Amino acid sequence: MVEYDAVVVGAGIIGLSTAYHLKNESPNAKILVVDKLNAAGQANTAKSAAAFRCLFSSHTNFVLADSSVEFYRHLQMDMNIDLKLKQTGYLWLFDEEDYKKMIPALEGLSKKGFEYDVHSEEELAEKLGLKTNLADDEEAKMMGLGSVYKGIFIPKAGIVDVDVLVKFYESEFLRLGGKIQYGTNVESVAVEPREVLGIPGEPYFWQSARSCGVNTNKGLIRAKQVVIAAGAWISQLLDPLGIECHVKSMKRQVFSVKARTDALQKLLFTKGFNDAGCVPFTIMPKPSVYFRPALEEDAFWLSYADEFPRAFKLEDDPQPEEYFYQYGMYQVLVKYFPQFTGCRPFSAFAGLYAVNTLDGQPVIFKEKGLIVVGGASGSGIMKADAIGRIATALYRGEEQAILYGDRKFKVSDLGLKNRHVEAERLVI
Ligand SMILES: Cc1cc2nc3c(=O)[nH]c(=O)nc-3n(C[C@H](O)[C@H](O)[C@H](O)COP(=O)(O)OP(=O)(O)OC[C@H]3O[C@@H](n4cnc5c(N)ncnc54)[C@H](O)[C@@H]3O)c2cc1C
């Protein structure tokens, strides 16, 4: 039976970035990727809004996103891979109270050379047809919505075509000689004693054991190193082994609304923010409902990452909830953007965030010989390249990963034992 040097479970953006960097750094290693689905990037990677931003207050977040986005820009600009990456920018709308809380973080970032522009209430109302003053709106008051005081525009942010990115990692991995088996469901991680004695039910607690591959619907696949990059399903494979990964899944929904009216066309193609000639990815004041320009569909994608009492729930086919749009997001949206009045979504989808319940940052650790990569908590596309490089450094036993742009990253900072990540103050 073939024994691989490494088997990577999961062909989402994180598994494929990891597999590609593993193979790139260790060209002689025999590496296999398996996925239960029939093609790459079909689970939560396909459900994402595929947006990115490079402005974060936490150094970890900044380095992971900024170096990944620089790599994606390099692919598009220097390697002619059309990722359809557009720097639409992010426009973050704040009420007065939250804007004042944000000032220290912004001043700190500005000293480090990060770029952002502050837009006044009047300017925003004029450019976007935005209703900024909700002080006399009884419904808005009841809903706890604040008036827009300022907008912070982050230019180094935007959108990308995640399918093309997935294809890049998949095809490069294959070109380097990696193998992929789709339609292969990993039922469990295979464990055996280092010294096999042939007794029924081994390994026993007195035996030194190791993972030796994965048990799948197509039989055992042997590998010296198992890498679990199964996204929201990570704990399904780790719980039976008593390994805690602090990753839970939570449903997230996206509703697409066509820009059918003149007012919505005007909003979608708002000029003056970016070279793409469109409205930026826009985040409303708390509760932070957002829309993303979906130019290829002539539409807006609307979403909101709700928390309490949203359940942690692992579902294979999560469904969008009509009422979540109708009585949730729509009600907030039309208060600020009356252009959407009467708009119904023409399509919708739902996926799962793999939430790291410790601090909302990815986890990349090795335990009992298994490498675990995931918990990207809703920002796995924008950080995937860096995550793959860090997981590769862990596989190769290196203390530092070298991210794109020659930035060093201490591998143990995203581990569990010596974890070191700062709290994020610019949370959406
Ligand atoms: C609605 C929504 C919007 C989002 N928006 C953004 C955004 O704008 N920007 C951003 O950066 N991120 C966003 N994200 C997050 C992003 O999609 C994820 O962080 C990223 O896709 C995670 O990649 P992954 O490879 O870990 O997971 P996945 O893409 O889910 O891949 C995991 C793979 O593992 C496979 N698998 C699982 N269990 C097994 C098994 N037992 N055997 C074999 N295969 C298995 C699955 O089939 C799947 O293909 C969003 C997510 C959602 C749901």
Image: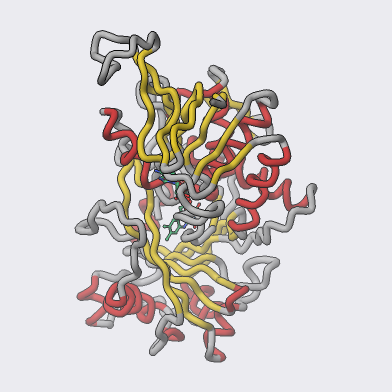
* Left or right of 137 on screen, residue 346: right
Q: Position of residue 139 (x, y in %)?
A: 24, 81
Nearer the observer, 366 or 328? 366
Q: Quadrant of the N terminus?
A: top right
Q: What percent of the width, then of the height, locates residue 409?
A: 55, 27
Name the quadrant containing residue 255: bottom left
The answer to whether 414 appears left or right of 126 in the picture is left
Image position, residue 318 (x, y; %): 34, 62
Corner quadrant of residue 400:
top right
In this rendering, is residue 295 above or below 194?
below
Which part of the image, by quadrant, shows the C terminus? bottom left
* Residue 136 visible in the displayed image: yes
- Judge whether 357 appears above or below 338 on screen: above
Number of numbered discs overlaid on the protein picture? 0
Q: Nearer the viewer, residue 214 or 156?
A: 214
Q: Position of residue 401 (x, y in %)?
A: 58, 26
Residue 62: tell me if it is visible.
no
Q: Residue at 58% of width from left, 36% of height from top? A: 19
**Looking at the picture, does residue 48 appear above or below residue 292?**
above
**Type of colouring:** secondary structure
The residue at 62%/68% (across/down) is 273
> What residue appears at the point 45 percent right and 55 percent down from the top-left corner?
44
Residue located at (61% from left, 73% from top)? 295
